[in-house]
Image (cartoon, rainbow, N blue to C red):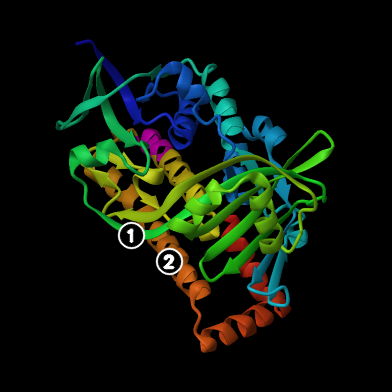
């Protein structure tokens, strides 16, 4: 079997893995990128209508590595966020006029992955391999060997970016803590007659949140994405409805904020969260969903994965400048220490928020209403919350 040498071997060619390969290529390193899907589907497998929320912190990093200019063409800025708890009178709104910037950006997965792969084509030091199955990972003193169905990679360090159900994590038997919320998220994309004006909504109901995310307009219509978390059987029942019935329910749940609606697509996925007990194993580092996943209530899971990417980029840059080999124990521990707390904190925040907004306890309901009112009137608290959500604090 042919053996290839690389300084960094990235396993997983999704968004996080591909962006990792792109940013590390800027450090003049020899990089391999392994993807289990075929070359064709690797570039179009995100040809669905799901969207991502890009935080301001992530945008800053994407600009730093020179790719944001291409991405922003497809991204719709979030100018305002309106949070509504059960009733319209219980509301909280955020904007970012004080910083003269936006709260975030919404982009289709397929548009983002296409931009990243087009950019990777120009990076001659990134070698991509598709239809790859990992068969074995062996740690040696100063390198790691990754054996696959096609080739063998000898590298200083592995970066596992192969998603929530990471096969690398399974092969290395890295323990995880996992929570199943026994719910699903219904994901809809739609055209509508009312101008969203760059406003995102999040409605909190007893069975889960419903978020409306503004997307780039299409021709004369406005476009948005809806992510609605609810009980498994209820989501299944919604999927069986015809579009007219589903639209009627959405109008009630969204306070008719969209106007005349036309559904473009509907999908669903199960809601669960996990946290790897450590973010490395031997000379393999976990990033993105391979390391952690969260309840989507705050919409920050992918952005924390991008923070992993930014931190590994800075760490590799530092070790290279010092002439220290990558993948040693100090390197892996430093990465873990830099990222684990952030993931643990976000897991706790999203889990507790889910519990708080689902509660039907009268005292909790009153407390939520009072709390929202206090925050709405206190610009300092609102600024702290928005800064955290933007990833700039």
Quadrant placement of the N terminus: top left
Q: Residue at x 49, y 44 (%)?
A: 306
Q: Residue furthest right?
A: 220
Circles 1 and 2: CB distance less than 8 Å?
A: yes
Q: Which element type, helix, strand or loop, lies under badge 2?
A: helix
Residue 312 appears anywhere in the view: yes
* Of pointers 1 and 2, the one earlier in the residue sequence: 1
62 over 86 or under it: above or below: above
Magenta part, dominant SS: helix
Foreground residue, 136 or 36? 36
Residue at position x 45%, y 32% from top?
14
Mark identifier at residue 392: none
Q: Position of residue 222 (x, y in %)?
A: 78, 43
Q: Quadrant of the C terminus?
A: bottom right
Task: Please tell me which residue is depicted at 41% across the width and 44% down the height of the picture.
Answer: 288
x and y percentages locating residue 343 in the rendered image: 40, 57
**Which residue corresponds to the image point at 39% horizontal and 45% vertical from the top-left?**
289
Q: Nearer the viewer, residue 276 or 101?
A: 276
Q: Nearer the viewer, residue 273 or 261?
A: 261
Q: Residues within 10 Å of mark 1 (few under 14, many from 20)?
A: some
Badge 2 is on which residue? Answer: 351
| Magenta stretch contains residue 227 | no
Q: In the visual, does 175 lie left or right of 286?
A: left
Q: Which residues are magenta?
A: 316-322
SS under mark 1: strand
Q: Decide which of 199, 334 is in the foreground and name it.
A: 199
The residue identified by callout 1 is 179
CA separation, marks 1 and 2?
10 Å
Q: Is residue 381 above or below residue 60?
A: below
Q: Relative to residue 256, is residue 116 depicted above or below? A: above
| Displayed quadrant of residue 162 | top left
């Amino acid at each position: 079997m042919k053996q290839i040498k690389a300084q960094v071997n990235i396993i997983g060619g999704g968004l996080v893995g591909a962006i990792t390969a792109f940013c590390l290529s800027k450090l003049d390193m020899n990089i391999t990128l392994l993807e289990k899907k075929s070359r064709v589907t690797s570039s179009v497998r995100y040809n669905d209508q799901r969207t991502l929320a890009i935080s301001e912190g992530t945008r800053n990093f994407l600009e730093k590595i020179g790719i944001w200019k291409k991405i922003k063409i497809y991204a719709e800025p979030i100018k305002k966020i309106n949070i509504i708890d059960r009733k319209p009178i219980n509301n909280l709104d955020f904007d970012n006029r004080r910083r003269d910037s936006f709260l975030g950006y919404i982009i289709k997965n397929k548009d983002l992955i296409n931009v990243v792969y087009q950019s990777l084509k120009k990076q001659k030091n990134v070698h991509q391999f598709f239809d790859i199955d990992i068969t074995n990972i062996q740690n040696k003193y100063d390198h790691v060997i990754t054996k696959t169905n096609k080739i063998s990679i000898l590298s200083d360090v592995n970066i596992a970016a192969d998603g929530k159900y990471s096969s690398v994590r399974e092969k290395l038997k890295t323990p995880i803590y996992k929570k199943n919320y026994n719910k699903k998220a219904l994901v809809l994309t739609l055209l509508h007659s009312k101008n969203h004006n760059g406003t995102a909504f999040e409605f909190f109901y007893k069975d889960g949140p419903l978020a409306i995310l503004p997307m780039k307009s299409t021709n004369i219509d406005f476009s948005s994405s809806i992510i609605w978390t609810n009980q498994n059987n209820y989501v299944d029942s919604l999927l069986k409805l015809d579009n007219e019935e589903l639209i009627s329910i959405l109008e009630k749940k969204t306070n008719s904020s969209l106007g005349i609606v036309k559904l473009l697509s509907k999908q669903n996925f199960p809601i669960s969260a996990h946290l790897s007990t450590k973010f490395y194993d031997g000379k393999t580092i976990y990033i993105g969903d391979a390391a952690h996943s969260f309840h989507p209530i705050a919409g920050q899971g992918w952005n924390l994965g991008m923070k992993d990417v930014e931190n590994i980029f800075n760490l590799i840059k530092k070790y290279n400048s010092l002439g220290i080999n990558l993948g040693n124990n100090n390197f892996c521990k430093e990465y873990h220490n830099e990222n684990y707390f952030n993931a643990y904190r976000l897991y706790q925040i999203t889990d507790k928020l889910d519990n708080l907004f689902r509660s039907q306890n009268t005292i909790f309901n009153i407390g939520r209403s009072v709390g929202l009112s206090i925050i709405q009137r206190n610009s300092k608290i609102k600024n702290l919350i928005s800064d955290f959500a933007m990833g700039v604090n």
